[in-house]
């Protein structure tokens, strides 16, 4: 287990739980269903399919800590982070009712799996509170949501405030029966349970390509082939899809702090506000005590000038509202994929034969959307009807979301122009240890990071997805693409988040001796 690695983006869940590891795939194989990705979507799907007697292979490029499930804040909600009055506009009253039912079913499924498989992950039902954020001047916004959530069939109550220390936010909507858990303890238990049902899980196995049709299956980066009657891409963001789905969703980074609190100092509940970006709060208990977990400050990936400042902003907000909070134990950020119309894309993967399926567009409710994938995809694979299939169909066109669609797709157009502009600096000599910049290199651009020991790491700055120029993210020591949210490690260019299907190519620089921390280079090194 890691120690409290404050600055290194380790989540509370990563810091307080070990997770099982799985051997890499070692030879070609075949199965009924091949699942790409061992997050909550992939593993719930594997668990359910294996329970139906299907021969399942799960391929995970890293391990259980490598995806967004390890970075979540762990609210399990049927009261979604997008408003039900918006869902009514987008999908009609019946659609909003089905959305509510689907997330209620997902939380129930997590509770049932915890009980059946004896997963000790601190699952508990708690109340959720929606409050009007300070600065949100819209009149009657809580009343509007109360009406829409009631029509959608949710239990909801208008209260003068959340209890105890949470009452600082004033009027609230109370949603009973929401829940919270320790995300990695749950994921580890789910993986073991899927394995016990016969699913074959492999870590450190990156899938490079996906095929559908009669010759369906996947090929790994190391050239191994898994033949399958059906393939499920549960990679959080599909890497096998160049554009179709990526025009309907956008990647945001969201930031989280876990601060120590005295047991009981803040009531055990969930709370979120109506701001955009919004704040979200919960309590976590583990052997070591209690934490106040606070998230927010979301920004579009690669378009944030100061990602390093987000933690400070979040901490300032937290201390203003919760003066009893003690030191920050953990802080981390992660990727949230926002669909233009609020609901995930779960079903047949557009552009592929009928036997390729996808789960993506999880939004801030990705734990329930991911669990829902595990309920819905086995139905679709088996040819069974599901009341949720149409609502979550990846090929749906929600005409009423056209404005959002145009806004998100116009948003990154200016970034394509960066290929022809100059670099941030003229020479690597301008980079002190810990600094990074994009440099012009002939007709192209190079992303250069000088690590704290003084060694330069240079990679192509051109995103392998569709060619935008990557931007530096100092909070995560990564290169982030402003167009569709792909991310790459600064040290070796490895792909951290899709849709890119591989990492940044490395670029050879003139040899340069490593510098001690704090010392500037003594000679000019040009590309
Ligand atoms: C900070 C934060 C807070 C959040 N809070 C909440 C919350 O409170 N409630 C909620 O419901 N949701 C929340 N979410 C969203 C939710 O956590 C995620 O949407 C969800 O965990 C995603 O699950 P997943 O299985 O789709 O993806 P992941 O957990 O990312 O799993 C996908 C897996 O696929 C693997 N993979 C990718 N490409 C390949 C490849 N080519 N080959 C093999 N493997 C591959 C990855 O390594 C990864 O392990 C939050 C997210 C973040 C980041
Ligand atoms: S993620 Fe699409 S161009 Fe980079």
Image (cartoon, rainbow, N blue to C red):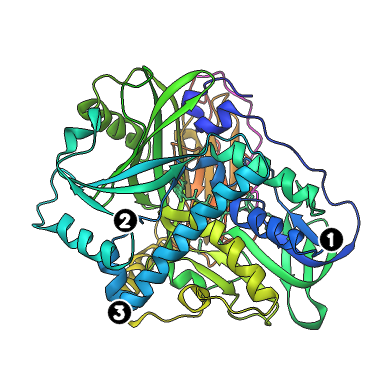
Q: Would you say residue 305 is visible in this rendering?
A: no
Q: Nearer the viewer, residue 391 or 134?
A: 391
Task: Choose top left, top right, bottom left or bottom right for residue 120.
Answer: top right
Task: Choose top left, top right, bottom left or bottom right for residue 381.
Answer: bottom right
Q: Marks 1 and 3: which is nearer the front?
A: 3
Q: Is mark 3 within 8 Å of ligand 1?
A: no
Q: Nearer the viewer, residue 344 or 500?
A: 344
Magenta residues (range):
503-518
Within 10 Å of the Cα at label 3, are there few (<14), some (14-19), or many (20+) other Cα atoms?
A: some
Above or below residue 513? Residue 104 is below
Query: Going from the N terminus, do you reach mark 3 or mark 2 first?
Result: 2
Disc 1: which residue: 223
Q: Is residue 336 left or right of residue 161?
A: right
Query: Going from the N terminus, do you reach mark 1 or mark 3 first?
Result: 1
Within 10 Å of the Cα at label 2, are there few (<14), some (14-19), or many (20+) other Cα atoms?
A: some
Q: Position of residue 269 (x, y in %)?
A: 35, 37
Disc 2: which residue: 155
| SS type, badge 3 | helix
Task: Name the quadrant of the C terminus.
Answer: top right
Query: Going from the N terminus, do you reach mark 2 or mark 1 first?
Result: 2
Q: Is residue 217 left or right of residue 66?
A: right
| SS type, badge 1 | loop
Q: Is residue 324 left or right of residue 13?
A: left
Disc 3: which residue: 400
Q: Position of residue 86 (x, y in %)?
A: 27, 68
Q: Is residue 101 left or right of residue 3?
A: left
The residue depicted at 53 percent of the width and 34 percent of the height is 122
Residue 360 belongs to the span the image colors magenta: no
Q: Position of residue 316 (x, y in %)?
A: 25, 29
């Amino acid at each position: 287990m890691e120690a409290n690695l404050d600055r290194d983006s380790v989540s509370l869940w990563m810091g307080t739980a070990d997770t099982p590891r799985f051997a890499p795939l070692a030879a070609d194989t075949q199965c009924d269903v091949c699942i790409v990705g061992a997050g909550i979507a992939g593993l719930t799907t594997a668990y359910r399919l294996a329970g139906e007697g299907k021969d399942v292979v799960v391929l995970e490029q890293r391990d259980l800590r490598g995806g967004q499930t390890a970075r979540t804040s762990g609210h399990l909600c049927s009261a979604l982070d997008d408003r039900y009055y918006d869902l009514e506009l987008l999908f009609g009253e019946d659609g909003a009712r089905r959305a509510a039912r689907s997330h209620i079913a997902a939380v129930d499924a997590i509770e049932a799996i915890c009980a059946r498989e004896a997963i000790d992950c601190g699952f508990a039902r708690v109340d959720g509170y929606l409050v009007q954020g300070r600065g949100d001047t819209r009149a009657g916004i809580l009343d509007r949501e109360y009406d829409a959530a009631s029509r959608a069939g949710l239990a909801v109550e208008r209260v003068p405030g959340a209890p105890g220390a949470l009452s600082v936010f004033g009027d609230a909507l109370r949603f009973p029966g929401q829940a919270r858990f320790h995300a990695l303890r749950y994921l580890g238990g789910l993986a073991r349970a899927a394995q016990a049902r016969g699913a074959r899980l492999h870590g450190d196995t990156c899938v490079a390509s996906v095929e559908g049709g009669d010759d369906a299956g996947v090929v790994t980066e190391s050239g191994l082939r898994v033949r399958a009657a059906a393939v499920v891409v549960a990679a959080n963001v599909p890497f096998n899809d160049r554009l179709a789905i990526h025009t309907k969703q956008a990647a945001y980074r969201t930031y989280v702090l876990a601060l120590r609190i005295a047991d009981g100092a803040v009531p055990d509940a969930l709370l979120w506000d109506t701001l955009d970006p919004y704040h979200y709060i919960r309590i976590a208990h583990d052997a070591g005590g209690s934490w106040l977990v606070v998230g927010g400050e979301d920004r579009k990936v690669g378009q944030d000038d100061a990602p390093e400042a987000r933690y400070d902003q979040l901490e300032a907000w937290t201390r203003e509202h919760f003066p009893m909070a003690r030191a920050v134990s953990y802080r981390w950020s992660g990727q949230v994929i926002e669909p233009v119309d609020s609901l995930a894309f779960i079903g047949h993967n557009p552009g592929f034969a009928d036997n390729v399926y996808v789960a993506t567009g999880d939004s801030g409710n990705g734990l329930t959307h991911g669990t829902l994938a595990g309920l819905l995809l086995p139905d679709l694979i088996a040819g069974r009807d599901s009341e949720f299939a149409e609502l979550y169909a990846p090929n749906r066109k929600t005409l009423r979301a056209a404005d959002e669609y145009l806004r998100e797709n116009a948003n990154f157009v200016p970034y394509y122009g960066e290929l022809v502009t100059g670099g941030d600096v003229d020479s690597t000599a301008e980079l002190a240890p810990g600094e990074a910049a994009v440099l012009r290199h002939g007709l192209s651009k190079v992303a250069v990071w000088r690590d704290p020991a003084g060694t330069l790491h240079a990679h192509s700055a051109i995103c392998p997805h569709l060619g935008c120029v990557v931007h530096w993210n100092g909070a995560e020591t990564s290169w982030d693409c402003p167009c569709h949210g792909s991310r790459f490690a600064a040290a070796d260019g490895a792909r951290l988040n899709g849709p890119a299907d591989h990492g940044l190519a490395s670029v050879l620089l003139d040899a340069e001796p490593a510098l001690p921390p704090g010392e500037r280079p003594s000679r000019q090194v040009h590309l």
